[in-house]
Amino acid sequence: MIAITGATGQLGHYVIKSLMKTVPASQIVAIVRNPAKAQALTAQGITVRQADYGDEAALTSALQGVEKLLLISSSEVVNVPRSIVMLLMPQRRLA
């Protein structure tokens, strides 16, 4: 599966739209902070998982089964804990 963070944002929207031309919706995971904003993605058959860069447990859960990850940074300034950065490092090598 391929996961995209920030999936409800402008860039995330365009990435998913483009990705769906070559990958089945069932292979796409949209990682979002607010699932209520992702109803259109769910309607297209995309798996929506809730996570936040500051929540290691939620991010770990959201990345289960993910083979490739596109990390779209947040427009908000956040201090990402080192544990989150380390969590994402193995995902980077898979891409």
Image (spheres, rainbow, N blue to C red):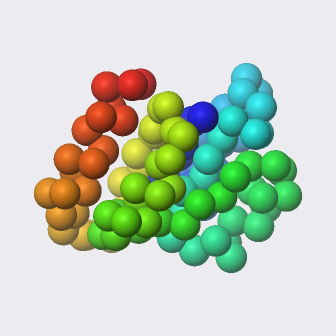
Image check: 85 left or right of 3?
left
Q: Position of residue 88 (x, y in %)?
A: 30, 44
As drawn, the residue found furthest toward the right would be 43
Q: Is residue 2 above or below residue 41?
A: above
Residue 27 placement (x, y as % from top left): 69, 36
For the point 36% across and 35% down, the residue is 91
Residue 45 pos. (x, y %): 81, 49
Q: Nearer the viewer, residue 93 or 23?
A: 93
Q: How many marks?
A: 0
Q: On screen, 76 above or below 94?
A: below
> Quadrant location of the C terminus?
top left
Residue, x 68% and y 76% (percent of image)?
A: 36
Give the vertical position of 32 relative to 19 (above or below): below
Report the residue at 25% width, 69% height from top: 77
Picture coordinates of residue 56 (x, y %)? 32, 64
Q: Does 91 sit left or right of 1 as displayed?
A: left
Q: Left or right of 79: which side holds 67? A: right
Can residue 23 be seen here? yes
Seen at 65% across and 58% down, the residue is 48
Q: Is residue 83 left or right of residue 33?
A: left
Q: Quadrant of residue 2?
A: top right
Camera-side residue of 84 and 65: 65
The quadrant holding residue 83 is bottom left
Task: Answer yes or no: is residue 11 visible.
Answer: no
- Quadrant in the picture for the N terminus: top right
Q: Nearer the viewer, residue 76 or 23?
A: 23
